[in-house]
Amino acid sequence: MKKILLLHTLLLSLFLAAGCAEKPKPQLTENQKAGLRKDAKEFLDSLKNVLVKEMQTNGIVAAVAVCSDTAQILTVNYGFSKGIYIKRVSLKYRNPNNAPDGFESKVLNHFSELNSVGKLDGNSEFFEVINSDGVYNVRYMKPIFVQAPCLNCHGSNEQISPDVKTLIQNKYPDDKATGYYPDELRGAVSIQKTL
Ligand code: HEC
């Protein structure tokens, strides 16, 4: 009986020790926050530069191809070069690769609600530190808004030219990313990084 009691006490203290040894959830420093903002901006700027340049030099139809092939390559390369998970996500996505995971859907819904009451702007962002299997990761999301030129490919049926429509429909038969209007929430940049 004594032995069993001793064993229980031993197990309990091991359990408590393990509990105490768990690191407290780290707080994000201002430097870490600034780094995430910088990555998101740099990534979006690089995508936008390619798009604008192609639209100006070769027109919208050519830009569709650039968007669809280059966007995925640029995204993978950017994440790889920085050693982070980064992508664009949207509740109404064009490319199924850009479908949000559970966390991203939750934040996108939160952003949509804020936007519908005029409380979302260029400075809005979302941070969360999560513990995944004992490793702390930060998840960061920043909204992407629709601007007038986006409507050439994300606007209403009348705003998208027949050539562009055909290209998009061939490449993305289940496209959900049309019918937008300016200032609407188009999606978000999503970053995940180990702390
Ligand atoms: C020339 C056509 C074109 C224009 C203009 C355009 N897009 Fe797109 N957009 C696309 C294509 C094609 C994809 C799918 C890219 C992929 O395969 O990752 C896409 C995907 C996206 C995505 C990723 C989510 C999804 O739906 O797959 C976001 C976010 C996005 N566009 C935002 C914008 C914004 C904001 C603008 C304006 C600044 C814009 N786009 C202008 C063609 C365009």
Image (cartoon, grey):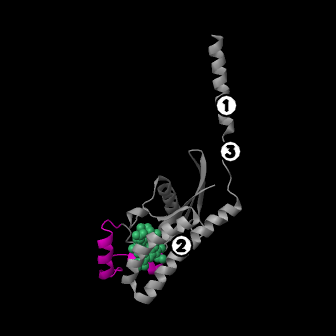
Q: Is residue 166 visible?
A: yes
Q: Amino acid at mark 3?
A: Pro
Residue 65 in percent (x, y) is at 38, 78
Q: Which residues are magenta?
A: 146-175
Q: Which mark is residue 181?
A: none
Residue designated by label 1: 16
Left or right: residue 67 compared with residue 36: left
Q: Is residue 117 visible?
A: no
Q: Amino acid at mark 1?
A: Leu
- Which sits in the foreground, 118 or 140? 140
Is disc 1 placed on a helix, strand or loop? helix
Mark 1 in CB contact with mark 3 (< 8 angstroms):
no
Q: Which mark is residue 24?
A: 3
Query: As displayed, is residue 65 above or below residue 97?
Result: below
Residue extending furthest top? 1
Disc 3 CB within 8 Å of nearest ligand 1 atom: no
Dot 3: within a 10 Å radius of its alpha carbon, few (fewer than 14), some, or many (20 or more) residues? few
Q: Quadrant of residue 140?
A: bottom right
